[in-house]
Image (spheres, rainbow, N blue to C red):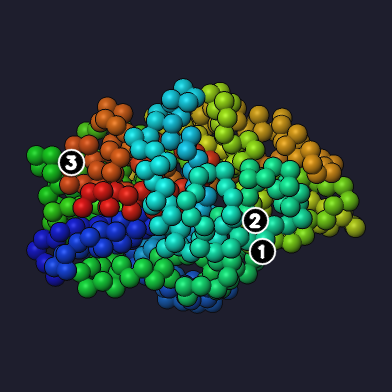
Amino acid sequence: MKNATYDLVMVGSSFAATFFLKKYLSKAPRTAKVLVLERGFLFPHAERVKERRGEETPYAKLNPDWHQTQETIENLTPEKRWIYTLGFGGSSNCWFGCTPRFLPNDFRMKTLYGVGNDWPLQYEDLEPYYTETEEMMSISGPETTPFPKTSAYPQPPHLFTDVDRLLQKRYQNQYINQPTARARVAANGRNACCASAVCSICPVNAKFTIENSNMGVYEDPRVELVFGAQVYSLELERDIVRKVFFRQEGKELSASGEVVALGANSIFNAHILLNAGDKNPSTGKGLGEQIGLDARVYLKDLKNLGGSTWVNANGYMLYDGDHRRDYAACLMESSNHPFIRMEKGKWRDIASFRMVFEDLPDPQNYVAPSDDILKPRVNYAGPTAYALKGIENMKQNLHKVLDCLPVERIEFDEPHNSEAHILGTTRMSASPAEGVVDKYLLHHQYRNLFVLGSGAFTTFTPANPTLTLSALSLYAADKSF
């Protein structure tokens, strides 16, 4: 490290960390000193593509991938997978680029539906930061949406399939081209989406990542980026964070900062706080994510052709409404990955939908310390009855939703054991009695500590979290400095 103390010490180089830093640097003086402690290493996109093709690359051994998460956590329920990527850019290296906004009512679940808690900020607070994030990510999206929007998307929408066009005609702005960070047209150093449905490692570099973002954060001379630095605890004194403790190449080290921000994922942020002795009763509690399952819709004499990306559309027909008092909202994703119907002459008489359901934080699902200070213990008792009831309602009513299509039959898969969206554990609240951080993502007790990312989500909507957690980081840095 170049300095004895820093104005800001950031843990991680994730979406949450990078967008926070972008806004912080826009407001900080030229003399500011920022230290970024990244646990992993840079694994360049070109090398990731080589690995995906089966070619040798020395970068492949630097960071454990999601198949190896048991090496980095103690999972008490191994049948439940927690998918994340360690290394520079975090999950931007493995995400699929889906970026719908939340709906305004998602922030008022307690007031409107009597479940969960209200968020301490509202959609209107985030709207300008949604727009700013969409500009930075060069999001492709439609002209009309079910959520309020004050500006057009930077890129034109991806193309519908034939089935999507029929559903959009029937439901208008309740069925839209999915907003996505998979480029529709080449821009900002990224190519257009190739629609090959291998988005985790985009072969043509069309998907937004921290590496290809051109945000200039890690090239800024005020920023010192240190790789291989695994943060595991903090020094807390008189309601202030004094030091950040980390291990690098087997050595125990520390860094001091006027402000500290945790930008790891929801599991590791909570673990760092718990190792440090954080006594907030909500810290580590309420771990969760959405629940997804696939529905295959067999069609009579209707070919499902077209589309220009992996997920063409989002359907909101089962999302918002008074039913959320009793069971979970559902967001439909129209999948356009390669699939065929195994019947001669009917190869494309089929549609595939991913049905994604919200859930509520449950204290039975939690992160805790283990005997290994570097490895969090994770327990997941399962989804709530609220979410499971939403699934059953969808199965009973999907045929009605699709009544504008010539449906022969619908087949449902079992729920997936991961949506790769790790939520909860440091949730946002109006008071420390209800959560860990305030609406600016500042810890209720330690007022120089930001805890970023989707761990702060008060409730778990069915919409993908990345756009919202990035907008929250811009909002927090803008309002706090």
Question: Would you call the spot at circle 1 few (<14 residues within 10 Å), some (14-19), or many (20 or more)?
Answer: some
- Kind of residue indicated by mark 3: Tyr
- The residue lying at 89 percent from left, 51 percent from top is 301
Q: Residue at x 52, y 36 (%)?
A: 358
Q: Point out the frontmost of discs 3 and 1.
A: 1
Indicate whether 68 appears above or below 407.
below
Secondary structure state at the residue bearing disc 3: loop
Q: Are marks 2 and 1 in contact (CB under 8 Å)?
A: yes
The residue lying at 74 percent from left, 62 percent from top is 306
- Number of disc labels: 3
Task: Name the quadrant containing residue 277.
Answer: top left
Q: Could one spot residue 79 in this view of the protein?
A: no
Q: Position of residue 107 (x, y in %)?
A: 43, 35
Give the class, few, some or many, for how many residues have Cα within 10 Å of label 2's Cα (few <14, many ≥20). Answer: many
Q: CA distance from mark 2 to mark 1?
A: 7 Å
Q: In front here: 51 or 120? A: 120
**From the viewer's perspective, is residue 208 above or below residue 175?**
below
Residue reaching furthest to the front: 150
Hey, what amino acid is under mark 1?
Ser
Dot 2: what SS?
Answer: strand
Number of the label disc, if any, that sits on residue 308: 1
Earlier residue among tags 3 and 2: 2
Tell me: residue 3, above or below residue 235: below
First in sequence: mark 3 vs mark 1:
1
Residue, disc 2 = 312
The kind of residue tagged 2 is Asn
